[in-house]
Image (cartoon, rainbow, N blue to C red):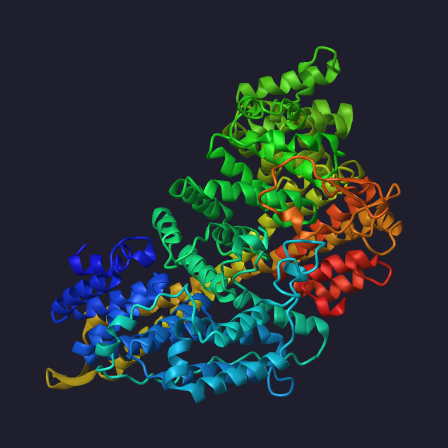
Amino acid sequence: MSSWRSLVLRLGEKCAEYGGNTDYRDQLETCFGVVRRELPHSQDDILSFLLQCAEQLPHKIPLYGTLVGLVNLEDEDSVKRILEDTYGNLQAALDSGSCNRIRILMRFLTALMCSKVLQPSSLVVLFETLLSSAATTVDEDKGNPSCQACADFYIICILSCLPWGGAELVEQVPEEIDRVMVGIQAYMSIRRHVSDAGCSAFEHIEDRSQDDGGKDFLEDLWSRIQDLSSKAWKLDSVPRPHLPFEPQLVAGKSHDFGSLNCPELPEPPASASSITYGKQKHEAELKYPQHIRRINIFPASKFEDLQPIDRFVVEEYLLDVLYFLNGCRKECASSMVGLPVPFRYEYLMAETIFSQILLLPQPPFRPIYYTLVIMDLCKALPGAFPAVVAGAVRSLFDKISELDMECRTRLILWFSHHLSNFQFIWPWEEWAYVLDLPKWAPQRVFVQEVLEREVRLSYWDKIKQSIESAPALEELLPPKGTANFIYSAEDGDQTERGLSSELSGMVKERVTTREIISWIDDHVLSTHGVDVTLRVVVQTLLNIGSKSFTHLITVLERYGQIISRICPDQDRQVMLISEVSSFWKNNAQMTAVAIDRMMGYRLVSNVAIVGWVFLPSNADQFHVSDRLWEILRNALTKTFNRITDLRKEVSSLKKSVVLASEAASKAQAELEDAKSKITLTLVDGEPVLAENPVKMKRLNANVERTKQEELSTQESLEAKEALLARAVDEIEELFLCLYKSFSEVLAEPLQDTDGSLHPSSVEADGMAIENEDTTAMELDKEGGKSEKSDLNGGSTVNGYNVGEREQWCLTTLGYVKAFTRQFASEIWPLAEKLDAEVLTLEVHPLLRKAVYYGLRRLDEF
């Protein structure tokens, strides 16, 4: 890397503000000197790299803004090019709805304004453009209120710039910025409050994730900005490196910034029904998602030294680092521990990362990324961060009964993986008391599922050794994952055992699939019936493939036709899945893998998996294990991913068809043009048409080739569209089947409720749960039993005392909401049919509420 690139990239990393011990002024002067020297030779590269660094290292934007300001003193034309490129990038980001890029580029423009590069009035015009678009959007008459997510995002972008440049704007253009603030206040008065109920990490604590009296994110940010304004825009979390250079910077020329255009909003739905409104609202929220939903894990005392705005600024730093440095773990961790703030922020960093892990409807990255980040931070801050993470786990564990079911699953997966990176060390004796809780208690189930996932990541004896400080917890370990081959016992059915042995011998001798099917038809199926045939074949083939994943897949690939022949319909496939579950009853992972592979090979359908999951014997286990939910989740996800991939392929093929058609038209036009230019020439005194035979042959061949490519692409598109249409029908059938199954299985249990399953109002065996206060979230409290009194004067162990029937309903309804939210994009097109066929007036209100909250149809409940 050239010296100037290295200096620009590492700018500020050794400064005191970024965790170092040098002066940023010296670094800026050194970097500026090198850039000024190299600018005449590498202008394009330097300007492009500067803008790239500002976009992808946004926590250092004040430094890059100051550096551009210094360059502006020497080369105004180069800086004008930077502004033009920034303008083009911002307009492109607005057009495409690239939220992170819009925020960062606006922050960069604010830093350029502070460094006297950009005129303050130009920045105010940008603010007013976004504000005008936002106000129009939420206007009932002129706009489209279903797209409020876009309007709110524009206002958030404006407000998020003010901590970085509010003081300069008030000093230089006080009237203009006052006009912007008044406009924002007017917008806040006409917008709708956004409830997080459908995407709150906590099920039964109203707005637990929201700050100060149930404010939504924008309302909370607005109050923080107002507080900052009342304190003369002074804050500690934003460095101001331009101030020492201000006497020099004022001599530079301040440039104008071109006007930007906000993209046109979709037209309001023709029919003003709640479903059409909800669909557009859902699409807007997908395009402009809320990038953080705070989860208050630690007590307020851990943040008492922070101003309200400091929390927002540090969150912005952390989220930007997580987003832009996701491809480089070490750089990510290094930047996160070296933010330019003068106070400690380990607790805030942990809360922000856990808020991302548990972000609903989904985080920006896969959970494995956050696992690696936390691991690197624990290594980077060994004396502080591991204890903070442990405190966060204890705090969330105390509230596990209120945690959303999807968040609970994510926490289990993260925690088990995290422990696997630290030799599975955890003070399990703190949680040994869960053995005294009922088997359906969420805390007990959590420990059980964490141990089960740890076994998957290691092996049974290793995990048993890791809990030696609480040996009684061995009761919660899963069985050793051996296969349950029913024909290995001597006392089994001898006839079936003989058939199994014969089939096994045929497989070992590599007898063809056709011959095996003939043998089954002639000697097994006709004599012993379907049940025995299915049991013998499935048990035997699974036993042959039980040595490893590879063996299993090989068996399914080679002999899947045999299974398909025996199980052609849904009822037989349900029996097949039951047999697989019986064979692998001691290994939840292999059960899930086998069923998933069978679905991939089309041996079982997704509807059959739903039918099996909701068998009465399985439904009784919904609240005590994640085993069934994992299998159902895998089936839904596989179906969803398939239709998503098909839509992407169809979209790509449509573009290819257009390009192929254009290429064919161009080739035909070239041929026609060549024919029209054929001239007359004399041959033996007679005029004849003269043409270039080589050229004409090439043009004709090109026409034929492009037409063939167009035809081939069109045929591929038609084939994919047919597959997509079939997939749409399949997913519709799947979700209707799923919700009908939920409705049927919940009908009787919910009849006994009084219309509410809120833990604070549920009475089980004469006892109830009290609303837990925030002291239960204290970090410093060590693990162990926490006893409280319930509303009826009884004893509540660790804040939990719900009967089995109520817990079953809570768990099942929690998964209804979780699945609905996760696959909302596919469920919204079915909303009318769901309302008509499943969510009728006869269905229990709690089921309808779970579905509506998953779709965020909050206004209807």
Q: Is residue 43 left or right of residue 142?
A: left
Figure quadrant of the C terminus: bottom right
Q: Position of residue 163 (x, y in %)?
A: 43, 71
Q: Is residue 129 left or right of residue 446?
A: left
Quarter of image, res 560: top right
Q: Is residue 700 visible?
A: no
Q: Is residue 727 visible?
A: yes
Residue in view at x 61 percent, y 41 percent: 781
Residue in view at x 55 percent, y 54 percent: 355
Q: Position of residue 122 (x, y in %)?
A: 37, 84
Q: Position of residue 605 (x, y in %)?
A: 66, 44
Residue in view at x 28 percent, y 59 percent: 12
Quarter of image, res 689: bottom left
Quarter of image, res 728: bottom right
Residue lying farthest to the top in this orientation? 490
Q: Is residue 665 left or right of residue 614?
A: left
Front-lying residue, 68 or 286: 68
